[in-house]
Amino acid sequence: MNIKFALAGNPNCGKTTMFNALTGANQYVGNWPGVTVEKKEGKVKGNKEDNITVVDLPGIYSLSPYTLEEVVSRDFLLNEDPDVIIDLVDATNIERNLYLTTQLIETGVPVVVALNMADLIEKRGLKIDTKRLSMVLGCPIIETSALKGTGLKELIAEAVKVAKQGEHQLPGAIFSEKLEEAIDTVVPALSETIATNKKRWYAVKVLENDEKVMNHIVLDAQTKTTIDALRKDLETELDDDMESIVTDGRYTYIQKIISTTVEKPKEKLTISDKIDKIVTNRFLGIPIFLLIMYIVYYISVTTVGTFVTDWTNDVFVVAIQDAVSGFLSSVGASGLLSAVIVDGIIGGVGAVIGFAPQMAILFLFLSILEDCGYMVRIAFVMDRVFRYFGLSGKSFIPLLIGSGCGVPAIMASKTIEQDNDRRLTIMTATFIPCGAKLPVIALLGGVMAGKVAGWEAGGMIAPAMYFLGIVAVLVSAIILKKTKPFSGKPAPFVMELPEYHIPSVKTVLLHVWERLKAFLIKAGTILVVACIVIWFLSTFGFEGGSFGMVEDTANSLIAVIGNVIAPIFAPLGFGNWQSVASSLTGFSAKEAIVSTMGVLANVSGDTEDAVNVAAGVAQWFPTAMAALSFLIFNLLDSPCLAAISTMANELNDRKWFWFAIIFQNVFAYAVSLMVYQIGSLVLYGTFGFWTVVAFVVLAFMLYMLFRPDPYKDQKVYSTRSVEA
Ligand code: BGO
C-alpha cells in the first residue's frame, strides 16, 4: 500500500534527525531555527510491505499563518491529504510542543505522537504518563529517540496501522463550554465542500476570523452574520479578541492535561544553564563573542595558518612550478604553452591554493563553535543589539552563516517574514567576509605589515575585517531603517537554546570538508579559466604597432582596460591597472583577486621570486593605507557571481536587485574613500580635494546615522504575501 506520513513539529524537536533516521537521508541537522522553509520528501527504509513516503514539514509552533513555515505546513496538511501526521513532541519541552498537537488533532488527519528525546526523560527527572496522555489526546503516543534510533520501528508500525485504519477520532472538548458550543454551531453551517473530519478545524479558524481561511471558503450571508454575532458575543463576554480567546483556551487545556500526566523535577540549573548565565549575559555576551571571534580569525590567519600557508607557497607551489616547467621543456613544449601553464595556471591557482590551509583552520573553528551549540547563543545575544537598531535577531543568522559562504547566507534570509528586513539582510549579508575573502585578507594583511616598520601584527587585519563587516551591516541597517521602504518594527524572534555538547569529530570534519571542497572545486574550475584569461590579457597586446606578446606588461590588453577604469579608484589610493584588474576579476569569485595578483606578479616580473606574490603586489600600493583601502573596497563591494545570482533569485525583483548592487558598491566606495583619505591625512599629512570630499561623505553618513527616525512609530510592516 502507498502511505504518506507528514512529519510535523516545533523547530528543534528533532525532525531532521528523525527524517534522516527514517529515510537514511543525510539532511543537515543544525540548531538554527528554520533555516529550511521547504518541505523534504523521502522513502522509509527497511519496510518491505508498504511503500511509505515521509514528508518533513518546516518546524512550526502553531498552524497560525504568521510565518512562511506555518503557511507551507498548514497548506500541506489541509490540501495534500497525508495518511497520517507524525507529530514530533520534544518530551523535554512538552508543554510548549503540545500547543501544536492541539491544532494538529483538529485537522481531521489521523495523528500519531512521537514523544521524542525520550532518552532525556529520565535524565531530566521527568515522569510522563504516556498511556493517560494518549487517552486524553485521542491518539497513540510512541516514545522515541531520533538521535539514538530507539522506538522508530514501533513508531512506523503504529503509523502504518493508523494509516490503514484511516479513521481519526476528533478530540473531545478542548475549549470552554461557551466556545465549544460556538464551534458546534459553526460546524454544520459550513459548506459541504469541506470534508466532515476537517470541519472542526475550519470552524475554529472561521470563528478566529483567520483572513487566509476566510478568503479560501465560501459562506452564505446568513451563516456569515450568525458567525459574526457568535464571535462578537464571545469577545464581549470574555473581554478579549477571538484569537487570544482561542490561544488562551488551548493553553488552559494543556495545563489541565499536563497537571495529571507529567511530573516535573524541582527546577535545577544544568551545566548549560550555568554556562549560559555567563555567555549570554547582557554585559558579557558581546565582549565574549568578540574575543572568541578575534582568537578564531587571529589563529586562522597567523600562527598555524601562516606556517602551513608559507610552506605551501614557498616550497610546494615552487616545487610544482619547477617540476612542470622542467617536464614541459624536456618534452619540447613551446615557450608559450609553458608560460600559460607555469605562470598563468600554476602561478594563479597556486597563489590561492596556498591559502586553503588557513581556510580549513577557519572552517574548523567555525564548525566547532556551531556544533557545540555556541553559535546559536550568539544569534540570541545579538538579537538584543539588532533589535535596538530595528532589525530582528533572525537577520543575524544569515550573517553568521556568511562567514562560511555568502550563498547559503543569502538563502537563509528566506525565513525573515518582513519584506523590508529580508531585503536588508540579503543586501548586507555579504559584508561579512566569507571563506573566499580570507586569501585576499591574508595577502593584503601581509602587504600592509610589510609597509609599516616594526608592525608584525598582519594577522590583526583578519579579525578587524570581520568586525568591520558586522559594523558595516549595522551602519547600513541604521541608515536604511530610517527610510520609508525599510522602516517598520522588527518581527519577534523565538528560538531554542539547545544544551551544549562536545562536538562530534565526524560532523565537524564533514562540515570543514564540505566547505573546503566547494573552494577546491572553484579553484579547479572558475579560477583556472580566470587565470588563463588574465594571463592572455596580460601577455598579449599592441606593441610597436602590431598585436602579439608584449615585452612590457604596461602595453598588455589588461593594462589598457585597467587604465581606463583606474582613475575612478585613484581617490581610494589604488588607481593603477593591476589592482583595478584584480578587483574586477573578484566578481567571478573573490579568490580570483588573489589568483589574478598571482598571474600579474608572475608575468610582470615585479618580483624576483615568482611565487612571492605579496612582494610583487606590494609595489602596486604606495602606502599601507592604499592597501587597506583596496582590501575594504573588495570586502564590501558586490559579492561574486554565484552570490549575486542568489541575491537576484531571493530578491525576485529587478528594481530591488539593482538597488542592492548600487548600494553595495557605493557603500564600499564611500567607506574606502573615507578610510584612505582621512587615514592618509592623519598618518602622512596628505591633504587635497578628495580629503574634503571624504569629510563631506563622513558628515553625510553621520547625519544619516544620527538623525531622528521619521518612521519610529510605524507599526505596520509589509509581509510577504503567500498563497493560503
Ligand atoms: C543539535 N535525543 C536527543 N538527546 N537529542 C536529539 C534527539 C533525541 O531523540 N533528536 C534530535 N536531537 P534537529 P529540527 C545540537 O544539532 O533534527 C537533537 O529543527 C547542536 N548542533 O541532535 O535539527 C539533534 O529538524 C549543538 O541537536 O531538529 C539536534 O526539528 C548542540 O536535537 C537538535 C546541541 O535536532 C535538533 C545540539 C550543532
Image: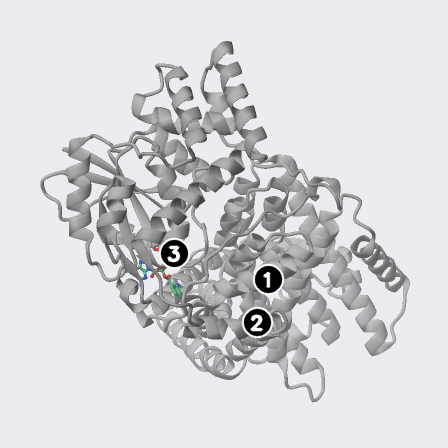
Q: Is residue 37 left or right of residue 588?
A: left
Type of residue at label 2?
A: Phe
Instruction: Find the distance from the CA under tag 2 to the CA under tag 3.
Output: 28 Å
Instruction: Find the distance from the CA under tag 1 to the CA under tag 2.
Output: 10 Å
Instruction: Find the distance from the CA under tag 1 to the CA under tag 3.
Output: 24 Å
Q: Secondary structure at mark 2?
A: helix
Q: Earlier in the sequence, mark 2 or mark 3?
A: 3
**In this view, which residue lies farthest toward the left?**
49
Instruction: Identify the residue position indicated by label 1 in the image.
Output: 382
Q: Are marks 1 and 3 in contact (CB under 8 Å)?
A: no
Q: Earlier in the sequence, mark 1 or mark 3?
A: 3
Instruction: Identify the residue position indicated by label 3 in the image.
Output: 93
Instruction: Identify the residue position indicated by label 2 in the image.
Output: 289
Type of residue at label 3?
A: Asn
Compared with 92, 446 (above or below) is below
Q: Secondary structure at mark 1?
A: helix
**In this view, which residue lies farthest toward the bottom?**
454
Q: Is residue 653 left or right of residue 312?
A: right
User: Which quarter is ligand 1 in?
Assistant: bottom left
Q: Secondary structure at mark 3?
A: helix
Relative image position of residue 336 (x, y in whole percent)? 48, 63
